[in-house]
Image (spheres, helix red, strand yellow):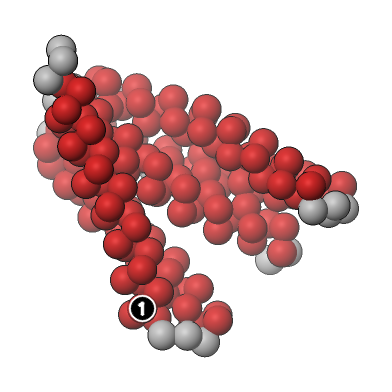
Amino acid sequence: MKKSIKKGFGFGITSGIITTLGLIVGLYSGTHSKFIVLGGIVMIAIADAMSDALGIHLSEEFNHSKTREIWESTISTFVFKFIFASIFIIPFLFLELQTAIVFCVVMGLLILSIFSFYIARKQKVNSLYVIFEHLIIAIVVIVITYFVGVFVSGFG
């Protein structure tokens, strides 16, 4: 896989998982509405994927990358972010709201762990440390967004 596409994949998978889990948990704790959570996932899959792709695009331009590499990174970031955010729609189509939330958190953390393991092996570093580091970041996001949702719901 080309370096520019790897960049989009790595960014898309991590951002797609962590951002979407934060959104799902925050919207759930604030609304307890399956419809709102689903709508949020669709919106984040589109808007955040486009935003992240533009961010990568500008970053690559800033680093004076070749035009082809810039566009490969841009497009792969959008595609992978969109895919990894969108997979979280599926559990909500088949499961009750609370079950879907738990399933999404477990699935997201599992995918993130597998990707972290892959990264650690490629870099020949301690895989448990890398997995732990990445999971802690994801869990902090999930916990904070949960409490933000609870806090915001208090104003409704």
State the quadrant of the N terminus.
bottom right
Reply above or below: 98 against 31. Answer: below
Q: Residue at x 42, y 38 (%)?
A: 86
Q: Farthest top residue? A: 156
State the quadrant of the C terminus.
top left
Element marked by disc 1: helix
Reply above or below: 5 against 81. Answer: below
Whether residue 107 is visible: no
Q: Residue at x 71, y 64 (%)?
A: 3
Q: Residue at x 47, y 74 (%)?
A: 118
Q: Which residue is mark 1?
A: 129
Pointer 1 local density, CA inside 10 Å: few below 14, some 14–19, many at least 20: few
Residue 89 x/y as whole percent: 33, 35
Residue 74 x/y as whole percent: 70, 43
State left or right for residue 64 relative to residue 17: right
State left or right for residue 64 relative to residue 98: right
State left or right for residue 50 relative to residue 152: right
Whether residue 2 is visible: yes
Number of marks drawn: 1
- Amino acid at the residue labelled 1: Tyr
Q: Residue at x 45, y 45 (%)?
A: 16
Residue 31 x/y as whole percent: 17, 22
Using the image as rendered, state which of residue 72 and residue 25 is in the foreground. 25
Residue 94 x/y as whole percent: 21, 35
